[in-house]
Amino acid sequence: MIDAMKFWLKETDIDGFRCDVAGMVPTDFWEEARLALDSVKKVFMLAEWEDPKLHEKAFDMTYTWDFHHLITDIAQGNKNASLLDTLFKKEKISYPNDAYRMYFTSNHDENSWNGTAYEKFGQGVKAFAVLTFVVPGMPLIYSGQEAGLNKRLKFFDKDTIEWRNDEFFDIYKTLIALKKRNKALWNGAYGGNMKILKSTVDPNVIVFIRTSDSNQILAVFNFSNKSLCATINDLPAGIYKNVFTKKTIRLNQQTTFNLAPWEFILLEK
């Protein structure tokens, strides 16, 4: 197997591998493989699994299945968004600082077997997509999501994607540019720490800030189907720019946000 993987490095100069169901293969094999592959060229390794041990010597990035299942429950009203705070605290403790965690609203398995992002997240589909870009990790854009993919692709048969102009194209384009220019959103140890701020209202309002040197991102989400008025204390006061509207806004240490159902506000400075 390692010889076969080396073949693709030497003959086609690929950058790395996504390893399917990686946790069902002994970790010591992956560690041996990684050592051998890096002797050919430095590779990037993605495990379709969720286990901190895989980051020690074998993989750069792993899937965030717990996150995906939680946001699905939040979108469907089975759990409240305050549990995201607990999840991210667990992530911080469990995974190395330089680990890349991959966040997603859809992938090939979820789309085909459990439903499209629109089916699972409903009116919150945009809010959860934005969330995957601003938490500490790397976002996944599954095939066709940038074109508003809203059908379950056949898993074992050829199935075409309707490539069309869709609002998600501009959303993802804006988010990719933001993640590239704002160091607070860089991956692994290069990104800024995440601090969740408490609101005075519904537990489905999530507010957090990420900071790296002078770079800052403030994210406000209403993960519910009702309008909410949320007051946030201990905000870093100053002038921010809305990532999507490009308008500037001055925030005080205590600021109130009037949020429509599933609304999100993304500010940077």
Image: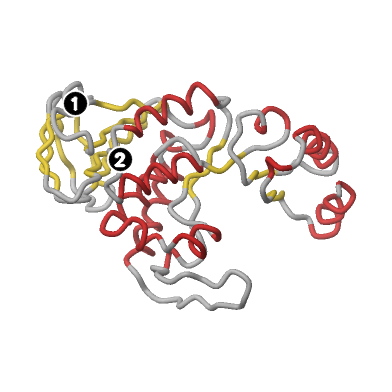
Residue type, label 1: Ala
The quarter of the picture where residue 198 lies is: top left
The quarter of the picture where residue 236 lies is: top left
State how many labels appear: 2
Under tag 1, what secondary structure?
Answer: loop
| Residue 22, percent from left and from top | 69, 44
Asked if 48 appears above or below 121 in the picture, the reply is above
Q: Residue at x 51, y 43 (%)?
A: 65
Q: Which mark is residue 24?
A: none
Q: Which mark is residue 79?
A: 2
Q: Residue at x 43, y 53 (%)?
A: 105
Q: Which residue is under mark 1?
A: 237
Residue type, label 2: Lys
Q: Is residue 247 left or right of residue 109?
A: left
| Residue 64, percent from left and from top | 51, 41
Near mark 2 (Cα within 10 A), the count class, few <14, some 14-19 or many ≥20, is some
The quarter of the picture where residue 67 lies is: top left
The residue most toward the front is 78
Give 171 or 245, whichever is nearer the viewer: 171
